[in-house]
Amino acid sequence: MSPSGRDTQPLTVTRQVKLPRNCLRSFSTKLQSLHRPPPQPPPPSRPIGVVCISDTHGTQPPLPPGDLLLHAGDLTKWGSFSEIQAQLTWLSAQPHTHKAIIAGNHDLLLDPNFRNKHPERWIEALRAAQPNEKQTTEEHITAEDLNWGEVIYLQNTSTTLTFGERIITVYGSPLTPQHGLSAFQHPRVQDVWTSTIPPNTDILLTHGPPWGHLDGIKKSGCPFLAQEIARSRPHTYWLWEGRKGLRCCWPST
């Protein structure tokens, strides 16, 4: 209050301005454009169903549904042509989008090096597979005569599979350390794995285990395979031998 009795405090004047509705609408649109919420992440894609089997040894069990069917070796008991063809026909008829397999130590037909090196073992296996035949008729039949149908065969090779917009790379190998006299085996001291698994492999499929993973009390797994897995770090690793399976997922970082 001043000596003259007048109030010298500043006055605050509020003025209400009414805008036309079209101006309000335009002003509101501009405000919304300045304060847009962050974009939402895309909805998660449907998971790919993977069915992994092994050591069927000539049997044909019912299989669960899925998108990708993997067989980790030992399709047969003796490795003859007729046994392998029967398994291929069965696998090819499955409803899964893709089917990929590797061989196992029982699948002798698929290892020509072993058959040439041990012809007596090959003849013995053929006679065991055809016990009612006086003379085997498959001695000179090779894997080139097989009808693979829809089955993809992996032998130290990769395949790239498409599931809609998603792509998966599978690397498969039948190699296992020496144990008895069987196919696809190598001396335990021989390194057959270093730098073999391609980069960006999504699924690794082997018949035998790496050292220290489901390889029993005697630790019969392959140490070179263990080192290669640690180096290449495939996203998912499947193995199956002796009716034991392992699925290992590496962290993404």
Image: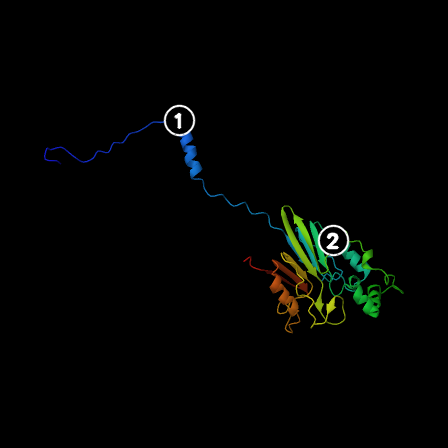
* Quarter of the N terminus within the rendering: top left
Circle 1 Cα neighbour tier, 10 Å, few/some/many (<14 / 14–19 / ≥20): few
Q: Residue furthest top?
A: 20
Instruction: Identify which residue is drawn at 79% across, 60% down.
Output: 83
Q: Position of residue 31 (x, y in %)?
A: 41, 36
Secondary structure of residue under mark 2: strand
Which amino acid type is marked by label 2?
Answer: Val
- Which of the 4 image quadrants contains residue 195? bottom right
Circle 2 Cα neighbour tier, 10 Å, few/some/many (<14 / 14–19 / ≥20): many
Secondary structure of residue under mark 1: helix
- Which of the 4 image quadrants contains residue 249? bottom right
User: Which of 38 and 198 lies nearest the eye of the viewer?
Assistant: 198
Q: Position of residue 80 (x, y in %)?
A: 81, 62
Q: Which disc number belongs to residue 134?
A: none
Observer-side mark, 2 or 1, equals 1
Q: Is residue 88 visible?
A: yes
In this picture, residue 245 sits left or right of residue 120 = left
- Which residue, given by chain and number where applicable, does mark 2 sit on? 151
- Which residue, given by chain and number where applicable, does mark 1 sit on? 21
Which amino acid type is marked by label 1?
Answer: Arg
- Which of the 4 image quadrants contains residue 252? bottom right
* Quarter of the C terminus within the rendering: bottom right
Q: Position of residue 241 (x, y in %)?
A: 68, 65
Instruction: Identify which residue is drawn at 43% across, 38% down.
Output: 34
